[in-house]
Amino acid sequence: DFQPQLDTLADIKWQKFTDNFLTLYAANKWKMDWFNDDHWNTIVENMKLFSLAVRSGNCVGVCFDPEPYGTDPWIYPGSYKDKSFEQVAEQVRRRGRQFITALQSTGLLTEVVRA
């Protein structure tokens, strides 16, 4: 249950700073797999929760840090030596759409900036 954390975010009284972002790290310590639906079901659900946190904190968006701090999912071929570049690129685009759709699930996310 994340409601206590969401309530804490909602209780923040922003004063001087009016355009606030929550930071999202692309940490990859568990070797995320672009082709693993179980991984991506978890990621999508987590991004929906993150979207709720952004909304609860009255933030304008997400500051996304793509540095993986572990196995690098951005390198081809990496773990995908049995797949063509085109296959991996198509799958990464598909997962990117899922990721952004989940982040926008509250309908309020307006900005994503890259750290």
Image (cartoon, helix red, strand yellow):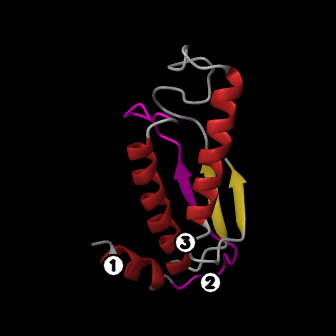
Q: Residue at x 40, y 77 (%)?
A: 6
- Nearer the observer: mark 2 or 3; the answer is 3
Give the residue number, with chain letter if any, for mark 1. 3
Alpha-carbon neighbours of circle 1 within 10 Å: few (<14), some, or many (≥20)?
few
Say which amino acid is labelled 1. Answer: Gln
Give residue 19's position: percent from left, percent from top.
Answer: 70, 73
Establish if 9 lies above or below 75: below
Say which amino acid is labelled 3. Answer: Val
Quarter of the image with the N terminus is bottom left
Secondary structure, mark 2, is: loop
Instruction: Inspect the magenta stretch and tell me whether residue 27 lies in it.
Output: yes
Mark drawn on residue 54: 3
Q: Residue at x 37, y 34 (%)?
A: 30
- Nearer the observer: mark 1 or 2; the answer is 1
Mark pair 3, 1: CA separation: 13 Å
Give residue 34's position: percent from left, percent from top.
Answer: 52, 36
Give residue 71's position: percent from left, percent from top.
Answer: 47, 26
Q: Residue at x 43, y 59 (%)?
A: 46
Query: Bounds of the magenta span?
Result: 13-34
Q: Quadrant of residue 106?
A: bottom right
**Is 38 situated left or right of 107 in this image?**
left
Of labels 1 and 2, earlier in sequence is 1
Of labels 3 and 1, earlier in sequence is 1
> Magenta part mainly helix, strand or loop?
loop
Say which amino acid is labelled 2. Answer: Gln
Instruction: Inspect the magenta stretch and tell me whether residue 35 lies in it.
Output: no
Give the residue number, with chain letter if any, for mark 2. 15
Q: Nearer the viewer, residue 34 or 61?
A: 34
Mark drawn on residue 65: none
**Is 77 situated left or right of 30 in this image?**
right
Q: Quadrant of residue 103?
A: bottom right
